Image (cartoon, rainbow, N blue to C red):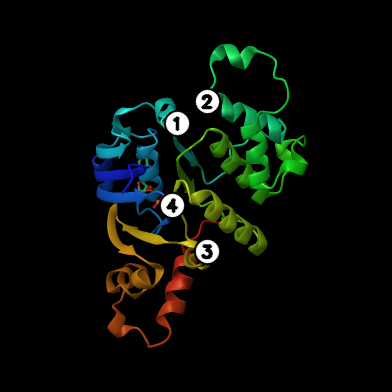
Amino acid sequence: MNDDYLEVRGLSVEFDGFRAVDGVDLTLLQGRLHFLIGPNGAGKTTLVDAVTGLVPGTGLARYHHQDLLQMRPHRIVRAGIGRTFQTATVFEGLSVLQNLDIAGGVHRSPWSMLLARRGTPSYVEEALETIGLADLRDRPAGILAHGQKQWLEIGMLLVQDARVMLLDEPVAGMSAEEREDTGDLLRRIGTERTIVVIEHDMDFVRSYADVVTVMHAGRVLAEGSVAEIQADPRVQEVYLGRTADETPEGTLEETLDETLEGTEHA
Ligand SMILES: Nc1ncnc2c1ncn2[C@@H]1O[C@H](COP(=O)(O)OP(=O)(O)OP(=O)(O)O)[C@@H](O)[C@H]1O
């Protein structure tokens, strides 16, 4: 195994005595699309918050021999860990290009940020092409469609050279076509990165997941392929509140899908 992976061991996060994340172990390998699913409140976002330094966590989150839990958020970004939030956080008044340029500033010195730029850096051009927004480079980010804003955010992680990308419900609110484009985008950029997607949409998970981790009540309940986790009685029980034996034959998958989709945010 190469050393480009994120290893989480015994990760816990407490809020006033309540364990939102409770002893989570995860190994997130480069080149696989890893999905994190689970009912509302399972601790998925809190886990990502801890790994990116937004909330304090105990345990270990090791990347390239560094423990992310001991680092401040800006150091974590510089170490190559990037994330998106459930709501897109682009600068609406700035152009697509300016958003990417600012994000790319993470790795530039304060002096170079002050110097006038000649032309567009090649890594920004590449990101524009990859996310499919090259034609919209000079448009304000505020006029972009919902899906395009999410792609711009992913582009901002690309120019930061994020080696690990943690994406919180990137396709929520997207059209079917936008979801497919996003899945294809993640496949392309995921070959040489570690990508973790928090998702409720089981159709999307089924189409693109290499590995699925199911969280429940702060813990990892199950991990495996989509087929494996759908067949797992513990997963069925958490989502359906009943065991496989009690579920009418043939309907389980559909019911599980509906239940998973029912947990989606408005
Ligand atoms: N800052 C906080 N202070 C107190 N409790 C919190 C805080 N952040 C999250 N929690 C609680 O921690 C638990 C896990 O929340 P989290 O948002 O991580 O779940 P989630 O799996 O991402 O859910 P969802 O799918 O709804 O986004 C919830 O019970 C939530 O209320």
Mark 2 to mark 4 CA distance (whole Å):
24 Å
Three-letter residue code for mark 1 = Val
Disc with the residue nearer the chain's start (2 vs 4): 4
Of pointers 2 and 3, the one earlier in the residue sequence: 2
**Disc nearer the start of the sequence (4/1):** 4
* Nearest the eye: 182 or 32: 32
Q: Do the residues labelled 2 and 3 touch (CB within 8 Å)?
A: no
Q: Which residue is drawn at 48% across and 37% down?
A: 162
State how many labels appear. Answer: 4
Amino acid carrying mark 3 in the image: Phe
In what element is the residue under mark 1?
Answer: helix
Residue 20 appears at what percent x and percent y? 30, 46
Q: In the picture provided, is 105 more to the left or to the right than 166? A: right
Disc nearer the start of the sequence (3/4)? 4
> Could you say whether the residue bearing mark 4 is in a helix, strand or loop?
loop
Whether the residue carrying mark 3 lies under 8 Å from ligand 1 is answered with: no
- Residue 205 in percent (x, y) is at 48, 63
At which x and y percent is residue 169? 51, 52
Circles 2, 1 touching at the beta carbon (< 8 Å): yes
Label of residue 77 in the image? 1
Residue placed under numbered mark 4 in the picture? 31
Horizontally, is 58 left or right of 230 in the view?
Answer: left
Above or below, comparing residue 182 to residue 243 in the picture: above
